[in-house]
Each structure stands twice: as C-alpha cells, then as structure tokens.
Amino acid sequence: KECLIVEGRERAETLQKQIECITSEMGNLKDTTQNDRENLESRIKEANEQIESLIQELNVEREASCCNQKRLVELEEQKKIVELEVRELRADLETSSGDRDEHEHELRRSRAIIDDLEHAQQEHHQ
C-alpha cells in the first residue's frame, strides 16, 4: 500500500513538474506570440508609412508630369509661332532679294545712262 502511495506521489510530482513545464512553455509561447504580434504590427505600420510616402511621391510626380505636359504644349505653340515668323521672314527676304535685284538692275541702268550722258557731254565739249 505504501509503495502505491509513494508511486502515486512520485507520479503526481512528475505530473506537477510536467504541468509547470507546459505552463511555462505556454507562457513563453504567449510572450513569443505577443512579440511576434508586436513585430508584425510594427512592420505593418512601417509598410503603411512607406505606402503613404510612395503615394505622396507619385502625386508629386504626377503633378510635375502635368506641369511638364502643359509646358510642352506651351513650347509647341511657341514653336509654331516662331516657325510661322521664320517663314514670313524668309518670304520677306526673298521678296526683298527680288526687290534688291530689281533695284540693282535699275541702279546699273541709271549708271549706264549717267555714263552715256557724261560721255555725250565730253564729246559735246570737245
């Protein structure tokens, strides 16, 4: 009978130690789970902050892109105006070149007439 009691006590102590170990492990797991949870929450928070930062960067880029697009349109309009002015200036230059040629021709004719008159005067004086 005493043997059974001793055996029972030993088994009870062993079971008690096992229960304490299991309880301790559960506490450790709970702590680990809490730490894991906190780490995950921290990582989620960091990821959300990065997402917000990226969204802000994208908004800035989109706004800059929009401004660049507007500037490109303005520059295209300016380019068209300048090209038109260049065409007009070239046309004026061609017209004035034609006028210049005509003026040079008239000038040569006038000089020839003057030369003829001077020559005629010289002959008349002789």
Image: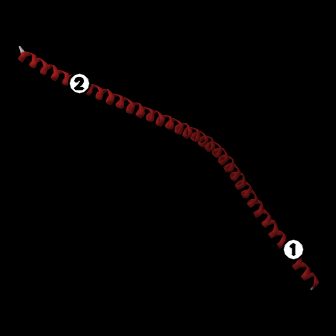
The numbered disc on residue 114 is: 1
- Residue at the bottom extreme of this rendering: 126
Label 2 amino acid?
Answer: Glu
Query: Relative to residue 11, is residue 123 drawn left or right?
Result: right
- Picture coordinates of residue 14, whole percent (x, y): 15, 23
Q: Position of residue 36 (x, y in %)?
A: 35, 31
Q: Secondary structure at mark 1?
A: helix
The residue located at (68%, 50%) in the rendering is: 82
Rate crowding at label 1 as few (under 14), some (14 to 19) or many (20 or more) other CA atoms within 10 Å.
few
Above-or-below relation of 106 to 89: below
For the N terminus, the quadrant is top left
The part of the image, by quadrant, that contains residue 103 is bottom right
Residue type at numbered disc 1: Ile
Q: Which secondary structure lies at badge 2?
A: helix
The residue lying toward the viewer, choosing from 101 and 82, is 82
Q: Residue at x 85, y 72 (%)?
A: 113
Give the labeled residue for mark 2.
Answer: 20
